[in-house]
């Protein structure tokens, strides 16, 4: 009997955000800093890079040093009116996810309005028991262990009974330390020891079930 729960990252795992969506969000974040901190485009870009390097996320630096309202920032930087056109998806994604036994959740550093919009546009939202977004981590995004623990508590999950599916090695490292099985979505030739299974895309997951029991 299958007893594990699947925890999926959203961006660059359930869809490919690199061609259109991430560039759009990056431009929106830079514009937000320009508008609300009175910076030039170059200054805003430099500040974003410094906060990313120091805190792992632009938002955390803005909250700590500028008192930025995280909900205001996330709402205004994740507006994608052309989302349907911008999404890059696998045509067999829904069929593949339905072949995976057990509960399924989404755990994303993105805001809830964006996460649910992406899942709806992908026509897979009904396959997930929960969408655990950055708001529910209390702005302790992956790879912060506290965010993982809050997600597990909210869904009554034991980490040892979970499979984390991610494109980010840093996030998978935290998952492995908590006792989760790990799936790295990557075209890289080799995986580090804390990765249990590597797949080039999610369509390969059903063939890997024996390695994730």
Image: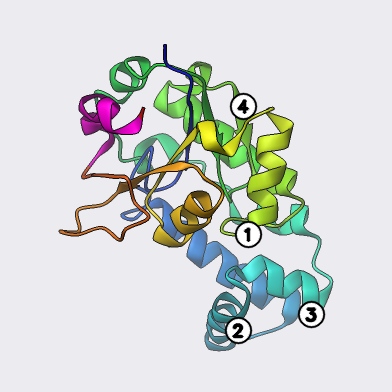
**Residue 208 location in percent, x, y?**
24, 30
**Residue 168 location in percent, x, y?**
41, 56
Residue at which label 1 appears: 144
Chief secondary structure of the magenta portion = helix
Q: 58 or 102: nearer the eye? A: 102
> As drawn, is 139 to the left or to the right of 21?
right
- The picture quadrant where one finds residue 165 is top left
Residue at which label 4 appears: 130
The reply to whether discs 4 and 3 touch (Cβ–Cβ < 8 Å) is no
Dot 1 or dot 2, earlier in sequence: 2
Kindly identify the residue that appears in the image at 51 percent across and 58 percent down.
25
Q: Which element carries disc 4, helix, strand or loop? A: strand
Dot 1 or dot 3, earlier in sequence: 3
Crowd tier of the residue under label 3, counting other residues whose Cα lies within 10 Å: few below 14, some 14–19, many 20 or above: few
Q: CA distance from mark 1 to mark 2?
A: 22 Å
> As drawn, is 143 to the left or to the right of 24?
right
Kindly identify the residue that appears in the image at 29 percent across and 26 percent down.
209
Residue 56 colored in magenta in the image: no
Q: CA distance from mark 4 to mark 3?
A: 32 Å
Dot 4 or dot 3, earlier in sequence: 3
Residue at which label 3 appears: 65
Kindly identify the residue that appears in the image at 77 percent across and 51 percent down.
138
**Residue 24 location in percent, x, y?**
45, 58
Can you see residue 90?
no
Kindly identify the residue that appears in the image at 68 percent across and 45 percent down.
149
Which stretch is magenta? 201-212
| Residue 47: assigned label | 2
């Amino acid at each position: 009997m299958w007893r594990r729960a699947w925890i999926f990252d959203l961006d660059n795992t359930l869809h490919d955000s690199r061609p259109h969506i991430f560039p759009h969000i990056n431009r929106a974040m830079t514009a937000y800093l320009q508008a609300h901190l009175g910076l030039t485009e170059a200054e805003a870009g430099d500040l974003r890079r410094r906060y990313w390097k120091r805190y792992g996320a632009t938002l955390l630096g803005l909250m700590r040093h500028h008192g930025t309202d995280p909900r205001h920032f996330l709402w205004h930087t994740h507006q994608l009116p052309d989302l349907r056109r911008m999404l890059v998806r696998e045509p067999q994604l829904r069929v593949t996810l339905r072949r995976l036994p057990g509960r399924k959740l989404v755990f994303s550093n993105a805001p809830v309005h964006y996460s649910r919009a992406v899942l709806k546009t992908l026509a897979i939202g009904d396959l997930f028991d929960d969408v655990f977004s950055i708001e529910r981590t209390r702005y302790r995004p992956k790879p912060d262990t506290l965010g993982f623990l809050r997600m597990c508590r909210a869904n009554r999950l034991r980490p040892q009974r979970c499979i984390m599916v991610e494109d980010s090695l840093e996030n998978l490292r935290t998952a492995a330390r908590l006792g989760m099985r790990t799936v790295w979505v990557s075209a890289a030739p080799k995986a580090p020891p804390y990765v249990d299974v590597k797949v080039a895309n999610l369509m390969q997951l059903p063939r890997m079930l024996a390695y994730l029991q």
